[in-house]
Image (tube, coloured by chain):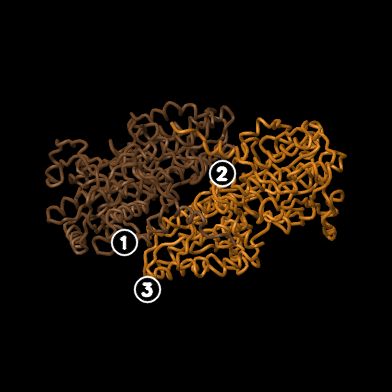
Chain colours: A orange, B brown
Amino acid sequence: MLPENPLRKAREKYLPILPSVLQQIDNVEWVKDKNTSLENEEIRALFPLTFGQPILKLQKNRNNKNRLLRVGVVFSGGQAAGGHNVITGLLDALILLTPESRLFGFLEGPEGIIKGKYKELTKELVQSYRNQGGFDLIGSGRTKIETLEHLAFALHTVEFMELDGLVIVGGDDSNTNAAILSEYFISKNSQTVVIGVPKTIDGDLKNTYVATSFGFDTACKTFSEAIGNITRDCLSAKKYYHFIKLMGRSASHIALECGLSTHPNMVLIAEEIAESKKTLQQITHQIADLVCERAEIGKNFGVILIPEGLIEFIPEIGVLIQELNHLLADFSIDNKEIVGRLTEDSQKSFISLPERIQQQLLLNRDPHGNVQVSFIETEKLLIETVTQELKRRLKDGKYRGAFSALHHFLGYEGRAGFPSNFDCNYCYSLGYAAALLITHNATGYMCCITGLTQNPIDWQVLGIPLTSLMNLEWRKGKKKPVIKKALVDLCSKSFAFYKQHRNAWRLNDHYLYPGPIQFFGEKQLTDTTSYSLSIDV
Amino acid sequence: MLPENPLRKAREKYLPILPSVLQQIDNVEWVKDKNTSLENEEIRALFPLTFGQPILKLQKNRNNKNRLLRVGVVFSGGQAAGGHNVITGLLDALILLTPESRLFGFLEGPEGIIKGKYKELTKELVQSYRNQGGFDLIGSGRTKIETLEHLAFALHTVEFMELDGLVIVGGDDSNTNAAILSEYFISKNSQTVVIGVPKTIDGDLKNTYVATSFGFDTACKTFSEAIGNITRDCLSAKKYYHFIKLMGRSASHIALECGLSTHPNMVLIAEEIAESKKTLQQITHQIADLVCERAEIGKNFGVILIPEGLIEFIPEIGVLIQELNHLLADFSIDNKEIVGRLTEDSQKSFISLPERIQQQLLLNRDPHGNVQVSFIETEKLLIETVTQELKRRLKDGKYRGAFSALHHFLGYEGRAGFPSNFDCNYCYSLGYAAALLITHNATGYMCCITGLTQNPIDWQVLGIPLTSLMNLEWRKGKKKPVIKKALVDLCSKSFAFYKQHRNAWRLNDHYLYPGPIQFFGEKQLTDTTSYSLSIDV
C-alpha cells in the first residue's frame, strides 16, 4: 500500500525563507517611514483615535527588550492558500521574542470572537499545518463585527482573555473591520492592539504598498495548471471552444494573471468592458468574430477566459442587477411581480436573457436579498448568445464552421491547496510582522511586505495604518468607511502587456502549459511569483 | 518578466526509466510465454489468420540483426497523458535498432490513415514533446476504420508508404480496430504489422496482463489534486456539500482511485449500484442519510464523488436511456412524441426527472442518435433529488440541518496535462515494446508492460494477441467482436479496501490532500503509481 499524504509530510518540513530584517527578530525596531495623508476629513472624523498615524518600516537595531504577549488570531472570509503560515509565523515569532508568549485561535471566523470560542495554538498543535493549505486549523466565517452589540462582545472577549493583540486575517471588508475594532478598543481604553493581514485570492486588496494579497499566487497557479491542461486538450482534439469562468468576485485580476500565464485566445477583462461600455450584444459579437476568424483559417476550437465579476460590469446587466437588488431586498414582493416593476430598459435586458439566467437572477439571493453574482452562469450565458449569433451568421453566409462549446468554472480548487513557496514565505513573514507590530503597540495597522518580486531575503517589512487606506462609499443608502477594492488598472504595465500580445494569441495558439505547482527543484520552477506582479514592478 | 514555460523545458530533459530488458535493445528476443485459449470459436471464425497466437515475452539475448523499418503511428480517441512518450519511445527504439529507420505520424486520428495524411517524425521534431501532455504533435480523432471501403483506403496508405508497422494508440474500440486491420492486412498479403497500445484515462482497458492503460495515473492524480483542495476548502468553510462528477465513461475506476487517494465522505461506485439494483430514489436516500447523520454531529458539509457513468447504471434510468436511444435513432420522430412512445415504466422514470435533465436526455445526441451520457448533469440531478428528500425529512422532523450544495465536473483538465513520471516511464517503454514487436513481425499484438507497481527497472515486457482479449457483443442488433470494457471488479482488493474504510470516512473527515503532481524530489512523491494498482497487486 502506498503512503498516505506524502506531500503533506514533505511540505511540513519546508522552512520558509525570511527577509533578512526578520532573521534576527530580537534586533529590530520600527521607524517612521513616511507620514500618511491627513486630508481625508470624513475618515478622520470616524477614526479620531487612529487616523493620521505614519507608515512604519522595520529595520535592524540593537537588542530590544521583549515582554510576554497573549495574542488572538482569526480567519475572516473565504480561504486563501497560506493562512496556516500566517499562524505559524506569528507563533514562531512570538515564542522567539518571549518563550512564554501564547497564541489563541478564534474558531470559525469573527463569530468566534463574539462568542468567545477559541483554542490555544501551541507549537505541537500547529506543527502539521506548516506550509499546508486550507483554514481548517481554526476554520473561518463571514460574520462581520459591526453592530455596537458585536463590538461590545468582542471587547469583552479580548479583555477576558487579556489579549495584547488581535490579528485579523482577511480581505478588504475584514481589514475595514479591523480598523473599526481598533478604534473602538482604544475608545474603551482596551490595551488590545488590532492588526490586519491582507488575504484574498481575488487580488483586489492592493495598493501602493500591498502589491498582492496572499493566496492570489497559489490560486492563479492552480487555475493556470487547469487552463493549460485544457488548452493542450483543446489543441489536440481541435473540436471545442472552452469557456472557462474564473472565481474572483468583481475584479479581473485572476483572469488577467491566468491569461498572462497561459495565453488563451481571448481573456475578457471586466474593467475594460465597463470602461468601453460594451453591451452583452457587443461582447457576444466580439467572441463570435473570434470564432469566425479562426474558422476561416480552419480552426474550430479555442479557449476563452471569463472573470466571475464580468456580468456586473456589463452596463445594462449591472443596472438590471442593481434594480433587482433594490426590489429583492423587499421580501414582500413576489418574484412574479418583480419584472413588471423594473424600468423599461431593464425589462428589455431581463427578457433578452435565457430563461435559466433569468431564474438565477431571481432565485439566488444572499442573506441581504442581493442577487448572488457568483451563482450566475455567465459562461453558459455567453455560449448561448454566441451560438445564436453564429447561427445568424451561418444563415447569412458570413460564417462557415462548426461551433461546439464546453463550459468550466474554476474556483474552489484554487483556494485551499498547498500554498506555493511564494505564499508560504509571504505568509510566514506576514505572521512575523504581525507579532512585531503588536510588540510596538501599533494598533490599527496592516502588515505589509514590499519588494515581493525580489528574493525573499531582500523583502522589506512595513506597517500601514488601516485608516490611510480608507474611503467613504455609499452602501445601502449610507456612507460607510471602506477599503476600496482595487480593480484591474487599465493603465498598468501588466494590462498593457496583455493588450500588446492579445492579437497574436487570437489566431496563433501561442498557448503556455504552466503545469502543476512544483515545490522541489530549480528555483525558477518553485519560487517565482505571478506574471502580473513581475511586469508591474 | 518571468520565463515562459519553465516546466515544459525542465520536463523535456527528463530521461524516462527503462526496464532492464529494454536497456540493451540490440540484445533481446521475444519468446513464447504462454499459449492463449483456443476455445472461442466465434472469434476464431472472424480472425482465422491472427487467432490463437501465443503470448510473447521479451528477454535478454545475444546480439540480433536488425533491419531498416518504416513505421506509422496514430492516436485514436480522447487524450491521455503520455501519448507523446509512446512516440518518443518508438522513435528512439527504431533509431537505436537501425539509425536509418523512419517514423511517420498520421494526422488527426485514423482519418489520417484513410486520407493518407501524415508527417514524418524526426528526432528534432519530437524533442520538445518529450514528457509533455496532450496529443498535439499529430492530433487525434474518433473516426473508426470499419467499413470495407475504409479498410481498403488504409491498406492503400500503408502500401503506398511502404510501412513495416502501424502502431495504433487507443482504447478498447481502437484496439479492436487494430485487430481487424491486422487480419485484413494479412488477408491482402500486406507486410504491415499492426500493433495496439493501451491508452485511456478511464482505466477500463484492463485484463490479466494489462494492469492499467496509460493516462489513468495522471488523470486520477490531477483530479485528486482538485478533490483534495476542495475537501480542504470544505473542511475549512464547513458550509457546503460538494458533489464532484468525474469523467470516465462507463466504469467507475477513476472514482474508486480518487476515493482511495482523497477519502471523501462518499464515493458512488456505479458497478455496485447496478449489482444491488439501486433505484434513483434509493441512491437519493443513501445520500440524504449521510447528510442527516452528519448533521446530527453538527457537520453540514461533505464531499461526494460521482462517476460520470453512474446514470446508465441506475436500473430504471439505464432502461429509459436504452429506449430513448432506440427512439432517437429514428430521426423522423419528433421530440414531443417520444415520451408518449416510451413504455409505461420509462414514462414514469422520465417524468420523475427534473426538467433540465429531461431536456438533456432529449437534446444531446451523438452522431448515431444516442443519448450523450457525458452531457447529463448527474451531479445536479442528485443535488436536486437530495434537496427535495431533505425538505421532506425536515418537514417530518427527521432532519435538522442546513443543506447547501455545489457541483463540479472534473474531466478535461486531467487528459492532457504533463504526464506523471509513472506515465512517462510506462509510455516510453510501450513505445520501445511496439518497435520490438514490429521487428518480430508480431502483427495483431498489444504491447504490454507488467509488474507496474515495482521499480520500472524490474518491469517485464510482453506482447498479447489482440484476438485473445476479444468477445462477441451485441451492438445495434449485430454481434460484433469487441474487447470487453473492464468494469470495477466488486471482488477486487481495491474495492474491498474501499468498502472496509468507507464507514470511517462517512463521518470522520479522514480527508487526504494529495496536492499537485510533483516531478522533482523524493521518489515517493514523484514515482508512485495509483492506490488501486498498488492494492490489487
Foreground disc of the pair 3, 2: 2
* Subunit under mark 3: A
Place of residue B127 in the rendered image (x, y in percent of width and height, measured from the top left)? 40, 58
User: Height in image: B74 above or below B409?
Assistant: below
Quarter of the image with the C terminus of chain B is top left
Left or right: where does residue A488 sit relative to residue B395?
A: right
Foreground disc of the pair 1, 2: 1
- Mark toward the start of the polypeptide (3 vs 2): 3
Q: Identity of the amino acid at label 2?
A: Gly
Foreground disc of the pair 3, 1: 1
Residue on which disc 2 sits: A417
Q: Residue B107: which numbered mark, if any?
A: 1
Q: Same chain for the residues at labels 3 and 2, yes or no?
A: yes
Residue on which disc 3 sits: A397
* Subunit under mark 2: A
Element at label 3: loop
Q: Residue B514 or B86: which is nearer the viewer?
A: B86
Q: Identity of the amino acid at label 3?
A: Gly
Location of residue B166 (image quadrant): bottom left
Left or right: where does residue B107 sit relative to residue A217?
A: left
